[in-house]
Image (cartoon, rainbow, N blue to C red):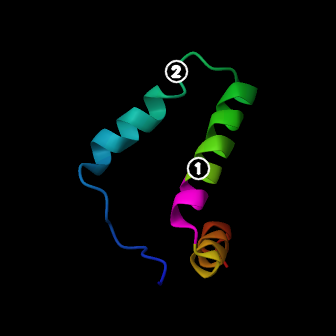
C-alpha cells in the first residue's frame, strides 16, 4: 500500500469544520492531546508501517 497524498476525503471542508470544532473550548494542552490521540487512532487504523513511515516523512516535508 502506498501513501495516498491526493484529495480523498468526501466533503473536505465539512471535515475541516468538524476537526476545528473538536478543539472548541479546549486549552492548548488539551488541544494537543486531542491531536495526539487522533494521530494514534488513525495510525492504528492504517496499520501499515511503511505507509506510516512515508506519512511521517511527508508531514516533516522530507
Query: Magenta includes 46?
Result: yes
Residue matched to label 2: 24
Please name the residue shown 49% across and 28% down the image. 22
Q: Position of residue 55 (x, y in %)?
A: 59, 71
Residue beneath disc 1 = 41
The percent coordinates of residue 4 (x first, y second) are 42, 76
Element class at badge 1: helix
Name the image quarter holding residue 33: top right
Residue 43 higher or lower than 5, as above or below: above
Would you identify the image quadrant in which residue 6 lies? Answer: bottom left
Q: Is 18 located above or below residue 50 in the figure?
A: above
What residue appears at the point 65 percent right and 42 percent down from the top-left corner? Answer: 37
- Given residues 55 and 13, the one toward you in this image is 55
Task: Please tell me whether mark 1 or mark 2 is closer to you in this view.
Answer: 1
Give the residues drawn in magenta, as a range.
42-47
Distance in Å between CA atoms under marks 1 and 2: 20 Å
User: Crowding near pointer 2: few (<14 within 10 Å), some, many (20+)?
Assistant: few
Quadrant in which the C terminus appears: bottom right
For the image shown, how many numbered marks are present on the structure?
2
Name the residue rendered at 52%, 21% in the picture: 24
Q: Against 41, is 55 above or below?
A: below
Mark 2: secondary structure? loop
Please identify the residue farthest to the right as the structure is shown: 29
Amino acid at each position: 500500500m502506498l501513501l495516498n497524498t491526493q484529495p480523498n476525503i468526501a466533503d473536505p471542508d465539512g471535515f475541516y469544520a468538524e476537526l476545528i470544532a473538536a478543539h472548541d473550548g479546549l486549552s492548548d494542552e488539551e488541544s494537543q492531546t486531542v491531536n495526539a490521540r487522533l494521530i494514534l487512532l488513525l495510525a492504528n487504523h492504517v496499520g501499515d508501517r511503511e505507509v506510516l513511515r512515508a506519512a511521517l516523512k511527508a508531514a516533516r516535508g522530507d
